[in-house]
């Protein structure tokens, strides 16, 4: 199908929005945001204010809705801007915590495997056979081979002085405590998933998680979250694709609020809660979670008749009581 939508100037974009029922208010400020942020990026933040119409029902009898081009009554351009700015600050604050978690995990993994062998990450025998040998789809490489290729690629692309210095002095192979500093979160989480179960348990227990499968899923989900933040994508009400597992009821009391609540698990607030939990382990005296709570409580109240809240992020009722602990 041919794309037939014409190019529009910033002024024409604003006229289009006004024609669909959006109140612009300060036109100069609105134009500045269109010029600086862009129509398409901002559209993700005025999407919740569009009128939705029902055009059928699914097999469970739930209504199937579709967004129209019209906005609900009272929608202001500034509603989308405030939501955009809230989300931007949310990603920045999460990036700070994710950096701490990633660095701590590098140390944890390098310390544990390095005790076994300086080059443990290069040997297939270091890892659980069934995980390391697993293949997916038509790819002839197994998990270990794919991971090694990724690891080697990151090491070769690294511009860090310590990598060059080490190779000049000791040769091309990097011990794990050096190599780990060239990896990203995804490489780290993939290596963790291949580790032998006793090794996974040792690291998981450090973070107060008894089930290694749960912790493995947390790292995978945090890598997903890290990528959303790194690519400046909309986060606040995102449908989480790589959803984390939950420990059994009563193991971590704050997790109980998410049990039997699939609609909450599918939203970002659970990921924020995992970041809070792990950051408090990495930095016991941190005030990060208090600062994030202050930001969450500043969630912008829209002018539009359609109300939005932290519940749209997947925040369970009473979250404030355990968050501040």
Image: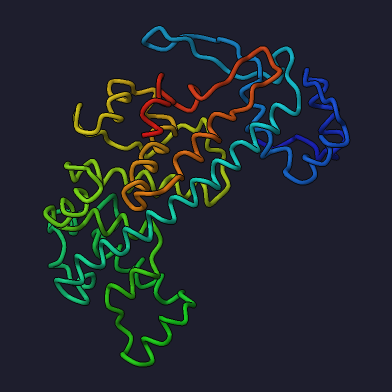
Q: Where is residue 248 in the image (x, y as percent from the top left)?
A: 19, 30
In the depicted structure, whether residue 105 falls above or below residue 217: below
Q: Which residue is drawn at 41% across and 56% down?
A: 100
Q: Quadrant of residue 60 in the image?
A: top left
Q: Where is residue 38 in the image (x, y as percent from the top left)?
A: 73, 42
315 and 218: which is toward the camera: 315
Quarter of the image that includes the N terminus: top right
Q: Quadrant of residue 203?
A: bottom left
Q: Who's the residue at 64% across and 31% down the image?
A: 83
Along the line of sight, which residue is nearer the eye, 222 or 128? Answer: 222
Q: Is residue 234 left or right of residue 283?
A: right
Q: Residue, x 48% and y 28% (percent of image)?
A: 313
Name of the residue lying farthest toward the bottom: 169
Residue 52 relative to residue 103: left or right: right
Q: Which residue is drawn at 33% across and 85% down?
A: 172
Q: In this view, does 169 lie above or below 178?
A: below
Residue 12 falls left or right of residue 184? right
Asked which colour scheme the image uses, the reply is: rainbow
The percent position of residue 186, horizontal first and vertical second, equals: 37, 56
Image position of 201 with respect to 240: above or below: below
Which quadrant, please, contains the C terminus?
A: top left
Q: Is residue 25 left or right of residue 167?
A: right
């Amino acid at each position: 199908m041919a794309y037939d939508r014409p190019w529009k100037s910033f002024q024409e974009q604003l006229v289009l929005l006004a024609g669909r029922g959006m109140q612009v208010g300060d036109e100069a400020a609105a134009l500045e945001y269109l010029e600086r942020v862009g129509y398409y990026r901002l559209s993700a933040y005025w999407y919740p204010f569009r009128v939705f119409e029902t055009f059928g029902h699914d097999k469970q009898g739930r209504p199937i809705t579709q967004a129209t081009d019209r906005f609900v009554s009272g929608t202001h351009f500034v509603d989308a801007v405030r939501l955009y700015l809230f989300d931007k600050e949310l990603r920045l604050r999460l990036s700070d915590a994710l950096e701490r978690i990633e660095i701590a995990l590098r140390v944890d993994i390098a310390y544990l495997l390095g005790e076994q062998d300086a080059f443990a990450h290069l040997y297939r025998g270091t890892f659980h056979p069934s995980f390391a040998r697993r293949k997916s789809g038509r790819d002839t490489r197994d998990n270990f081979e794919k991971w090694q290729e990724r690891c080697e690629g990151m090491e070769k692309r690294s511009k860090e002085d310590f990598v060059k210095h080490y190779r000049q002095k000791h040769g091309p192979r990097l011990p794990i405590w050096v190599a780990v500093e060239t990896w990203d979160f995804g490489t780290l989480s993939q290596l963790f998933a291949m580790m032998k179960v006793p090794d996974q348990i040792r690291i998981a227990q450090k973070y107060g998680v008894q089930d290694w499968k749960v912790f493995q899923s947390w790292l995978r989900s945090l890598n997903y979250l890290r990528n959303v933040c790194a690519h400046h994508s909309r986060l606040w009400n995102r449908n989480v694709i790589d959803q984390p597992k939950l420990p059994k009821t009563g193991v971590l009391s704050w997790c109980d609020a998410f049990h039997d609540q699939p609609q909450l698990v599918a939203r970002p607030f659970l990921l924020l809660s995992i970041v809070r939990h792990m950051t408090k382990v990495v930095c016991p005296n941190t005030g990060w979670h208090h600062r994030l709570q202050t930001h969450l409580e500043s969630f912008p109240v829209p002018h539009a008749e359609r109300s939005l809240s932290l519940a749209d992020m997947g925040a369970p009722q009473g979250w404030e009581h355990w968050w501040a602990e």
